[in-house]
Image (spheres, rainbow, N blue to C red):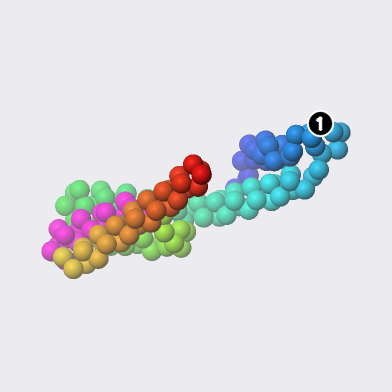
Amino acid sequence: MPAPKFLPLIALCMSTANVPLAAQDTAQPDPAPWRATKTSLYLAFTSARRNLPSATAALDLARKASVAALEGRPAEAEVLAERSLARLKQVAPAGPLWLEPLQTLAATQLDQKKIGRARETVRRIRDELDTRVTALTSELLATNS
């Protein structure tokens, strides 16, 4: 898969944003901030591109699980949701992507009267939401101080 054509433009924009104004006015700007930005962008896009097929497959499985649950096939939906979570575990150990398959998993477990397992899945959802709220609150407080 070839790299997107806009990456050099993003790297250029980010690099000039990190160069001090005094260096931008001279004929020879300091290349150190540019190199650091270029390296960090390269690593971020390479990692995202490498994980994209797995993440896409995991989300596709999650959507298939939702459809199976809506069509009244809770056992199949549960298997698909668990497979989706297994793939997501490889891509992102935790994060908001987990919420859809976790919700489907909890609903299908309840449909099948698996109350204990559904309770554990709901705890996982609550823990994920608590983690997200804590992270967002910390970012907000850091920005305001």
| Residue shown at 26% from the left, 54% from the top | 104
Which residue appears farthest toward the front when viewing the image? Answer: 145
| Residue shown at 19% from the left, 49% from the top | 71
> Vertically, is 15 above or below 112?
above
Which residue appears farthest toward the top when viewing the image? Answer: 25
Image side of residue 50 versus residue 41, left or right: left
| Residue shown at 61% from the left, 41% from the top | 4
Q: In which quarter of the view is residue 111 placed?
A: bottom left
> Vertically, is 34 above or below 65?
above
Image side of residue 57 versus residue 32, left or right: left
Q: Give the x, y percent position of residue 45.
A: 59, 49
Which residue appears farthest toward the left when viewing the image? Answer: 113
Q: In which quarter of the view is residue 95 placed?
A: bottom left
Q: Give the x, y percent position of residue 20.
A: 74, 38
Residue, disc 1:
25
Label 1 sits on what residue type? Asp
Residue 127 on the magenta segment: no
Q: Give the x, y percent position of residue 32.
A: 77, 48
Which structural element holds mark 1? helix
Image side of residue 49 versus residue 59, left or right: right
Which residue appears farthest toward the bottom when viewing the image? Answer: 116
Residue 102 on the magenta segment: yes
Q: Give the x, y percent position of residue 66.
A: 26, 50
Image side of residue 12 versus residue 95, left or right: right
Q: Which segment did they paint magenta?
A: 98-114
